[in-house]
Amino acid sequence: MIEEFDNLIDNSSDCIIVELSKRGCVLKDQKTLMTYLLNLDEYEKIVEQRNNHILKKVIKNKGLNILDCTGGFARDSAIISSLGNTVTLIENNPVIMRVLKDAISRINSTAMKNIFNNITTKFGDCIDFIRTTNRKYDYIYFDFMFNINKSALPSKKEQFLRKIVHNNINRNQNIINEVLRRVGCKVIIKEHAKSNDYKHLDIINTYKEKIVKYHLLEGKNENY
Ligand SMILES: C[S@@+](CC[C@H](N)C(=O)[O-])C[C@H]1O[C@@H](n2cnc3c(N)ncnc32)[C@H](O)[C@@H]1O
């Protein structure tokens, strides 16, 4: 049931609207008339390179249960799943979730279908999910929107994400603090290479790339 998100989407207030077309669920910027159709088959090129992806160094084993708390358009979940893990993806924005669910239903490639068969999507706030789930995870993953512009020439996907998702660094930090108290597993936080929003935390290791970095931390709950 993808349509369950339709009544949560308010197409009247924002300049970004969701249009249902024959091609699928299209995002449209009413000001610029730019449109975007998420095509998950395009991730095939990215997951083909999975063995060179830095997440393979961060998450060393396979067969793990991983909670992606900031699902977005599921690029990172797809990489984590392609590395042989089971992913639960949480997303709290109804527009993003609507577009993602629609895109999942339109996947053509067998490889991508297999990757998404190991990703369960859940709509809601990640902290509510963590407070109520009985399930234990091996890693909990965060990729909040960056406060710094990632690139001067962002892709259409990136431009739409920035317009739809509103970031609140204090709220994100509160979520991370609470998660670190509640769980006893590893926690990964992705942030822009030039920002330092999490430097006050006990970071075990930071895996750096040119544009982004991944911090590895550990939850403090010994009874997890
Ligand atoms: C930068 S995007 C993530 C991109 C994603 N990693 C990918 O590879 O496509 C951040 C996403 O997290 C979602 N988000 C932010 N705070 C959240 C929360 N507290 N619970 C669930 N989702 C959240 C936003 O709506 C947004 O879609």
Image: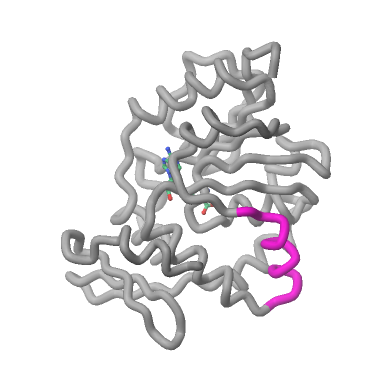
User: Which percent across, then down, holds residue 173?
Assistant: 41, 24
Give the answer, above or below, for where 79 lies relative to 199: below
Give the answer, above or below, for where 179 lies relative to 38: above
Task: Please name the residue shown 65% across and 61% down the image.
Answer: 46
Quick check: 141 left or right of 128? Answer: right
Quick check: 136 left or right of 121? Answer: right
Prevailing secondary structure of the magenta residues: helix
Q: Would you say residue 63 sits in the magenta stretch? A: no
Give the answer, above or below, for where 104 lies relative to 137: below
Furthest-right residue in this view = 62
**Count of labels in the image:** 0
Q: Would you say residue 114 sits in the magenta stretch? A: yes
Task: Please name the residue shown 50% across and 44% down the image.
Answer: 70
Task: Please name the residue shown 24% across and 61% down the image.
Answer: 10
**Nearer-the-camera pick, 144 or 132:** 132
Which quadrant would residue 168 be assigned to in this image? top left
Provide the residue span drawn in magenta: 109-120
Quick check: 198 left or right of 113? Answer: left
User: Which percent across, then down, holds residue 59?
Assistant: 74, 37
Which quadrant would residue 68 be assigned to in this image? top right
Quick check: 14 left or right of 171? Answer: left
Q: In which quarter of the image is the C terminus?
A: top right
